[in-house]
Image (cartoon, rainbow, N blue to C red):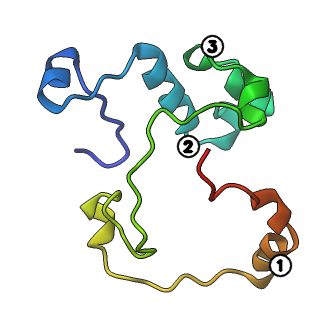
Amino acid sequence: MEKGKIWFPTPESEEINGVKMSPDCQDFIKKLLVKDPSKRLGHVGGVKEVLAHPWLKSINPQDLLARKLKAPVLPELSEDKLDINCFDEEFTQQELRETEVPIDWQKKVDDNQELYEGFDKKQ
């Protein structure tokens, strides 16, 4: 695959790998991946612009923001906090590198922990 190109399954390849992706879904992904942030989906109208995309037309934005929607796929989780079976080997086989986080970024995370409450709970 050429670097920087987005590949989507064709109708012929859907049957081979089981992936089905509608034209609206492909358009949504392409618009989120635009390199120029000023041209990316959501730049002009924020979350309202993103939620107005045709691919998301069946989603009630209020239910989404209130976290009332059930996830379409729930992975099987084990008790082992180090279990990585839900991640692609492309990522789990990479060499580990330490990432340095700027202190001001870490402070923002530390100061806003309440925003993350409930994200680790099953619905």
User: Residue at coordinates 44% horizontally, 38% vertically from top-left?
Assistant: 73
User: Residue at coordinates 36% horizontally, 70% vertically from top-left?
Assistant: 83
Question: Which amino acid type corresponds to the residue marked 1 in the rendered image?
Answer: Lys
Instruction: Identify the image quadrant of residue 67.
Output: top right
User: Residue at coordinates 53% horizontally, 26% vertically from top-left?
Assistant: 28
* Whole-percent x, y for residue 122 in the image: 59, 50
Q: Nearer the viewer, residue 19 or 42?
A: 19
Regarding residue 70, the answer to whether it shows in the image is yes
**Mark-to-mark CA distance, 2 and 3:** 25 Å
Above or below: residue 62 compared with residue 75: above
User: Residue at coordinates 25% horizontally, 27% vertically from top-left?
Assistant: 9
Q: Residues within 10 Å of mark 3 (few under 14, many from 20)?
A: few
**Mark-to-mark CA distance, 1 and 3:** 37 Å
Labels 2 and 3 touching (C-beta < 8 A): no
Instruction: Identify the image quadrant of residue 40.
Output: top right
Question: Which amino acid type corresponds to the residue marked 3 in the rendered image?
Answer: Lys
* Whole-percent x, y for residue 117 in the image: 76, 59
Q: Quadrant of the C terminus?
A: top right
Question: Which amino acid type corresponds to the residue marked 2 in the rendered image?
Answer: Lys
**Mark-to-mark CA distance, 1 and 2:** 28 Å
Labels 1 and 3 touching (C-beta < 8 A): no
Q: Which residue is mark 2?
A: 35
Q: Is residue 121 left or right of residue 73?
A: right
Instruction: Identify the image quadrant of residue 42.
Output: top right
Mark 3 lies on a secondary structure that is loop
Q: Which residue is mark 1?
A: 107
Q: Which residue is mark 3?
A: 57
Please tell me which of labels 1 and 3 falls first in the chain. Answer: 3
Q: Quadrant of the N terminus?
A: top left
Please tell me which of labels 1 and 2 falls first in the chain. Answer: 2
